Amino acid sequence: MFRPKNDLRYELKYLLRRDQVEPLVAELRQQMPVDRYAGPLGMYPVTSLYYDTPHFKAYWDKLDGHRNRRKIRVRVYGASNITPQTPAFLEIKQRIDMMMRKRRVLLPYVEAIDFSSYADLGVERAEKGKVSDRDALHEVYYLYYTVQLRPVCVVTYDRLAFEGQEYAPDLRITLDFNIRGRIHDLDLTSTGNTSDKLVLGPEFSVLEIKANQNVPRWVGEMVGRHRCTFYRVSKYCTVLERSFAINQRARVFMNVQAGNNSANHESIDNQ
């Protein structure tokens, strides 16, 4: 049965140990093609500049489990060296009860980070017939001035992505490796001291399964067969915690079994 694609989807996250990755990826390669925009191996870097209020409202909304919340970021896909003209996406990621909605607008990086210009940009997009772009730009413009949105951290990782075939265009499965971040030097074009901190450890990766409907049966069977651990990890929140940007409230810890050893890893709500 055909599964139409829309902008509301379920997102499931799992934490994988290094020994789980190779057999799971081998099975995925038999079932799904790699992302068409990522080259033959399906791997590409993802770099995101996250915004929040001076009191970290987006962070605390997640920690407190609010069913309706949103996060603002500027994200660059596939570029290691970012220039002012590198294509970047302004993204509004919003949780609506149990589902996630992502809206985005493609801009040159230098324009994407200039929130003060979004009112004029929105008018230009509307004149070109891109009303959804205008609405997203005006929403961020409003938040920028009313809640004082500001850049707070950079999150970077390497992503291996698989996309659904013709019968399931809504299905997308990704694995994220080498998850790292920083709370300093927040200009993505900077050539200064941009040393990032590894936040999960090289032995772990994050599996994400995204679909507008229930996941296909074979996906559920695959997750069970490879004993994937369901894990509501937030890359954004983890970077803030590991960088000690958040230090006035008790952190949440979860024991993660790694072979015969157990390690403590900080866990915040779903990214």
Image (spheres, helix red, strand yellow):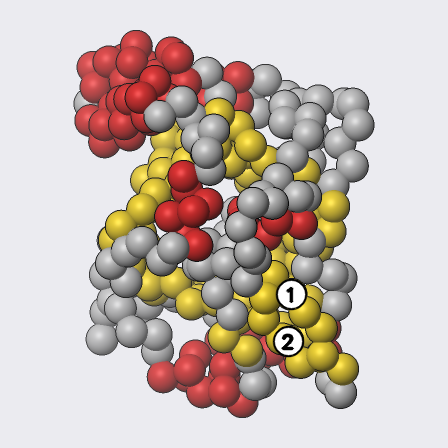
Identify the residue at horizontal 28%, vertical 56% (top origin): 67
Residue 256: which numbered mark, if any? Answer: 2
Sequence-wise, which precedes: disc 2 or disc 1?
2
Identify the residue at horizontal 34%, vertical 18% (top origin): 145
Identify the residue at horizontal 53%, vertical 22% (top origin): 109
In the rendered view, tell whether residue 251 sits above or below residue 168.
Answer: above
Observer-nearest of 169 and 59: 59
Identify the residue at horizontal 36%, vertical 38% (top origin): 92
- For residue 269, side relative to residue 118 (left or right): right
Observer-nearest of 37 and 51: 51
Q: Secondary structure at mark 2?
A: strand
The residue that label 1 is drawn on is: 265
CB under 8 Å between discs 2 and 1 = yes
Can see residue 232?
A: yes
- Badge 2: residue crowd in 10 Å (few <14, some 14–19, many ≥20): some
Observer-nearest of 34 and 135: 135
- For residue 270, side relative to residue 181 (left or right): left
Residue 37: which numbered mark, if any? Answer: none
Q: Identity of the amino acid at label 2?
A: Val
Q: Identity of the amino acid at label 1?
A: His
Query: Horizontal and vertical percent for residue 7?
Result: 27, 50
